[in-house]
Image: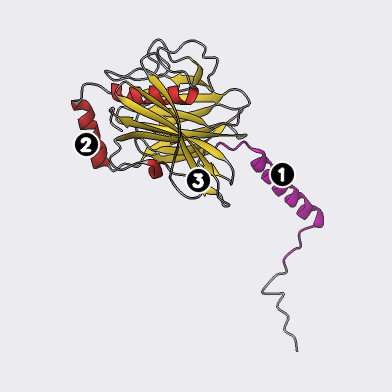
Amino acid sequence: MRANRSASHPATTPLPVQRIGQALSAIATVAAVILAAPVHALQLVEASDGVSVEAILSIKEPTRIRIENAPITDVFGNILSSNCGPSPALPTNPGTTAPGAGLPTINPGGEIVLECDRDKGEVYIRPVGDSAKPVNLFVSSADATYTLLLRRADTPADTIVIRDKTPKAFRATGAAQAAAGPSPNPIRAMKALLVAMTTDRVPADVQVEEAHRTIQLWTEVRFSLVRQYEGRGLIGEKFLLQNVGTEPMVLAEQEFDRDGGEVAGIAIEHHNLRPGESTSVYVIRRGGGR
């Protein structure tokens, strides 16, 4: 005989079909609002002084750049226009120049527009033109200069946060050495030389020599020295590297750091090459020795 359990467990009243439909509709509406809301991503890039790191640059919206736990003191690159000078736009230290200071109002060959937040020690950049070429930008704090390779993309407004991955003990040692030196002018000279090499706008005190000399590097590449620059206690070399192999390759700056070469900085225009593709490689060395 089947027991009657309705007395101790009352039956659950079914939800009417129309109420189920309304609930599902409400859930769908909330989900649609969430998905339609603008996404503001944050790019956290771990960097160290003198080593290039990649990040994404919005082609339509401003991109904010800041350094974690430190104000930006200097920005160097191929800048079209800037609101950062001639008055100091960001906190500066003795011997340094505020971002954009001394730049002409308009640089016709510039790649980005630069704006500075004087109070927060941050900058905002926006690319100009239709070029797909990555933007090279040097961003400095009081202790280090970070090299950004910014790849253009159709993304919303974004923030790039630079986090120094150098161990604190090394950072402290580097800061002490910088304070003991006469000034950070060698760093600015290196950045100015790199900009001259990438834009072919060479200062009068820098000598240029055409080379066009093939150099043996790896079997799957064709590598040649195109041009050499000398001045301000530095030697800059512009190389052309072509992938002549059958597989894609990924390049890293460390591969061009020659032993005993007194290398001060390396920049690569395109890190990823398909077969047949080429890229410029820039190497800056200290002194006049080869």
Query: Which residue lies under the disc numbered 2?
Result: 173
Is residue 171 part of the magenta span, yes or no?
no
- The mark that comes first in sequence, 2 or 3, is 2
Residue type beneath disc 3: Val
Q: Secondary structure at mark 2?
A: helix
Tag nearer the camera, 1 or 3: 3
Q: Secondary structure at mark 3?
A: strand
Which numbered dot is residue 111?
A: none
Q: Mark 1: few, some, or many residues within 10 Å (few <14, many ≥20)?
A: few
Q: Mark 2: few, some, or many residues within 10 Å (few <14, many ≥20)?
A: few
| Quadrant the N terminus occupies | bottom right
- The mark that comes first in sequence, 2 or 1, is 1
Work out how far the residue at label 2 is from the one at label 1, CA to CA, in angstroms: 56 Å
Q: Secondary structure at mark 1?
A: helix
- Tags 2 and 3 in contact by the CB under 8 Å rule? no
- The mark that comes first in sequence, 1 or 3, is 1
Residue type beneath disc 1: Thr
Tag nearer the camera, 2 or 1: 2
- Relative horizontal placement of residue 186, taking residue 267 as reference (left or right): left
Which numbered dot is residue 221?
A: 3
Query: Which residue lies under the disc numbered 1?
Result: 29
Q: Magenta segment, which residues? A: 12-40
Q: Residue furthest right?
A: 18
At which x and y percent is residue 161?
44, 35
- Residue at image point 53% right, 19% down: 110
